[in-house]
């Protein structure tokens, strides 16, 4: 391929748009992110292509493997574009029916469609589905619409317009000014204004500077950055090139965890394609500006999400934080001025440059501008990737987009911000999601993981789970985090095992203050958040564990009696049939009972009983 100039880039875009209009093909967009691969989208794609070829439909239909569509709960997904027909939970065996009845017969296959909850007689289009209709896709504007391994698909949808404008029409100071006007705050968790960070680095005098992208994403339940890289890698590359121009950096790294093979593969393909067209490397778009980008694979250490630890890792040293100042904008990677933002932050940049900072700032709240991408998981119907304006309420995200809690169970809490975040109860569901308001109720925005919990969740055990993760991932450099989180975990395990003592709860509170005030890095300083937030809103559960030796949610097995209430038991035998060790004694038309010598406390009977008869 030839190296493009700005005019040639625009001509290529015009030709691509014209070609798409001329061929008139209907595109069959099949999700191809990691989640959909896991549920069988690759066999679906292969079967669909085979059926189209067998029926001679190649001149009318094009099968496109996209990245993540977002609606993970319904995958594998296919969207018939531009009709907007949305197929869900597909299998390879469904493809002959889809081709015969829909593509040839012209009638959508109803059993494979999303069920319209309002008008069951009308076929819902993708835009009608509440999961999509309550979103505002900006970062995710291309998800499920383009082939992530095709640079032409990206260029056709205004890709690299931002780079052309930044390199050929704007001075570095003007780029930074638009970033400041936009109000974009770093989406990696801390929420520091991106324009301000870039300004600091631009003012640092050095012959070498670096631009880094944090794609480490170690929070349990988080898959935002992975999905963006799998669905739209060029958006991240374009943002990094613009950032490099703003601070006069000529080299960049994307730090991605090795556990993201598909994201890494597609990102490398995108880098190679950009380089081949002259959008990466020497003299980009004939502008005189050079920039090279490299992927650095991390080994999955949670602490390497902290910026200084990430930099040490790239340098080939052990990933451990260092004290600040000096800040990375002055002395970062190899002691050179460095800016680091996460995947979502960079994916916003090109649109800000093309449309202007004020356009971006027109959405959101006073201090938190734009949109935010969240990964919703846990006890929620619509598990998936969503993007909403800053200021949307937690209730809207969980119930309007997420579809609420399954099995008619009650909502109990939502963990926001990963292990460093906090649990927010039902009373605060109307809290606007922005950096300041979320902090007021004891959580943090974090990178965007949202874990929903229903009434069966034990909040003490949830705090123990997150503390186990934090303690395991502590780098061990500073004593407060290394020893403090271990002591945290010991106390929480003791409480969950029924060995809690008076004073344990107070010890947790005292430890929290010490660790928050003395830990070296932000990960250690926020480690107490899961404990503090659950103590703040669910202290009665801690008291029940310690003083009454019971778990109100019936999840801590050492505090359960494993007895069957004869008044509540209906004699249905469900527990008997489910027990893996034959510890249930039951005969037809009789009440069941548990043989405690055989019982292994696996909770299978408790989970199977529909009548709440098992304690």
Image (spheres, rainbow, N blue to C red):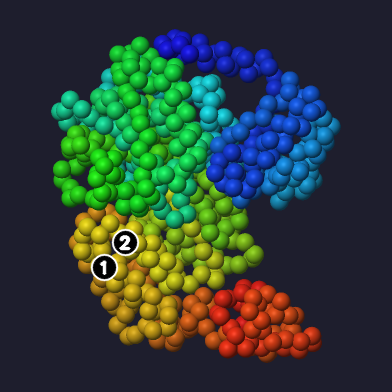
Q: Image point 39% across, 75% down: which residue?
A: 493
Q: Position of residue 178 (x, y in %)?
A: 33, 28
Q: Which of 206 and 363 is in front in this view?
A: 206
Quarter location, residue 409? bottom right
When the figure is inspected, residue 355 is found, relative to residue 418, above or below; the finding is above
Q: Where is residue 319 in the image (x, y as percent from the top left)?
A: 27, 49
Quarter location, residue 253? top left
- State whether residue 305 appears in this view: yes
Q: Residues within 10 Å of mark 2 (few under 14, many from 20)?
A: many
Q: Which of 495 and 51 is in front in this view?
A: 51
Please give left or right for residue 509 compared with residue 45 in the image: left
- Give the mark nearest the N terminus, 2 or 1: 1
Quadrant of the drawing holding the C terminus: bottom right
When the figure is inspected, residue 573 is found, relative to residue 462, above or below; the finding is below
Please give left or right for residue 404 compared with residue 471 in the image: right
When the figure is inspected, residue 606 is found, relative to residue 132, above or below; the finding is below
- Tell which tag, 2 or 1, sits nearer the viewer: 1
- State whether residue 355 appears in this view: no
Q: Where is residue 372 in the image (x, y as percent from the top left)?
A: 44, 43
Q: Image point 35% across, 62% down: which residue?
A: 472
> At numbered mark 2, what does the secondary structure look like: helix, strand or loop?
loop
Per the model, the C-alpha gap separating discs 2 and 1 is 9 Å
Please name the residue that numbered disc 1 is placed on.
484
Instruction: Determine whether label 2 and label 1 are within 8 Å by CB.
Output: yes
Q: Nearer the viewer, residue 244 or 588?
A: 588
Please name the residue that numbered disc 2 is placed on.
527
């Amino acid at each position: 391929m030839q190296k493009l100039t700005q005019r040639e880039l625009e001509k290529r875009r015009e030709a691509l748009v014209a070609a798409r209009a001329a061929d008139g093909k209907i595109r069959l967009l099949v999700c191809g992110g990691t989640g959909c691969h896991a549920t069988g989208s690759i066999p679906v794609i292969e079967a669909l292509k085979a059926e189209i070829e067998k029926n001679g439909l190649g001149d009318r239909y094009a099968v496109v493997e996209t990245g993540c569509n977002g609606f993970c709960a319904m995958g594998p997904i296919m969207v018939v574009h531009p009709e907007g027909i949305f197929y869900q939970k597909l299998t390879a065996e469904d493809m002959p029916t889809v081709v015969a009845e829909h593509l040839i017969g012209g009638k959508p296959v109803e059993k494979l469609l999303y069920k319209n909850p309002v008008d069951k007689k009308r076929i819902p289009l993708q835009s009608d589905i509440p999961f999509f209709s309550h979103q505002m896709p900006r970062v995710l504007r291309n998800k499920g619409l383009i082939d992530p391994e095709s640079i032409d698909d990206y260029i056709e949808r205004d890709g690299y317009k931002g780079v052309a404008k930044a390199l050929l029409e704007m001075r570095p100071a003007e780029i930074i000014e638009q970033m400041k006007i936009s109000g974009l705050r770093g989406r990696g968790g801390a929420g520091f204004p991106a324009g301000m960070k870039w300004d600091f680095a631009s003012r640092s005098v050095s012959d070498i500077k670096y631009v880094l992208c944090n794609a480490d994403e170690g929070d349990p339940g988080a898959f935002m950055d992975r999905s963006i890289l799998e669905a739209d890698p060029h958006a991240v590359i374009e943002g990094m090139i613009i950032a490099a121009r703003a601070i006069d950096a000529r080299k960049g790294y994307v730090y991605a965890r090795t556990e993201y093979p598909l994201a890494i593969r597609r990102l490398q393909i995108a880098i190679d394609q950009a380089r081949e067209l002259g959008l990466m490397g020497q003299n980009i778009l004939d502008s005189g500006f050079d920039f090279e980008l490299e992927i650095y694979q991390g080994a999955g250490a949670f602490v390497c999400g902290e910026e200084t630890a990430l930099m040490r890792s790239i340098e080939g040293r052990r990933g451990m934080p260092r004290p600040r100042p000096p800040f990375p904008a002055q002395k970062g990677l190899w002691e050179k001025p460095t800016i680091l933002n996460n995947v979502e932050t960079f994916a916003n940049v090109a649109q800000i440059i093309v449309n202007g900072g004020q356009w971006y700032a027109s959405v959101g709240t006073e201090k938190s501008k734009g949109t935010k991408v969240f990964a919703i998981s846990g006890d929620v119907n619509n598990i998936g990737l969503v993007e909403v304006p800053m200021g949307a309420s937690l209730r809207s995200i969980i119930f309007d987009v997420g579809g609420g809690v399954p099995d008619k169970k009650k909502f109990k809490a939502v963990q926001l911000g990963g292990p460093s975040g906090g649990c927010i109860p039902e009373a605060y569901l109307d809290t606007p999601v922005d950096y300041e308001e979320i902090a007021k109720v004891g959580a943090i925005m974090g990178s965007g993981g949202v874990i929903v919990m229903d009434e069966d969740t034990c909040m003490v055990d949830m705090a123990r789970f997150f503390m186990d993760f934090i303690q395991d991932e502590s780098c061990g450099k500073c004593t407060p985090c290394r020893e403090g989180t271990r002591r945290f975990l010991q106390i929480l395990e003791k409480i969950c095992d029924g060995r809690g003592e008076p004073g344990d709860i107070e010890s947790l509170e005292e430890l929290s203050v010490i660790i928050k005030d003395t830990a070296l890095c932000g990960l250690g300083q926020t480690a107490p958040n899961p404990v503090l937030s659950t103590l703040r809103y669910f202290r009665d559960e801690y008291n029940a564990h310690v003083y009454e030796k019971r778990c109100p949610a019936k999840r801590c097995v050492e505090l359960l009696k494993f007895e069957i209430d004869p008044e509540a038991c209906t004699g249905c035998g469900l527990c008997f049939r489910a027990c893996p060790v034959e510890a249930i004694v039951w005969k037809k038309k009789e009440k069941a009972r548990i043989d405690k010598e055989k019982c292994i406390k696996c909770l299978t009977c408790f989970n199977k009983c529909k009548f709440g008869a098992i304690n």
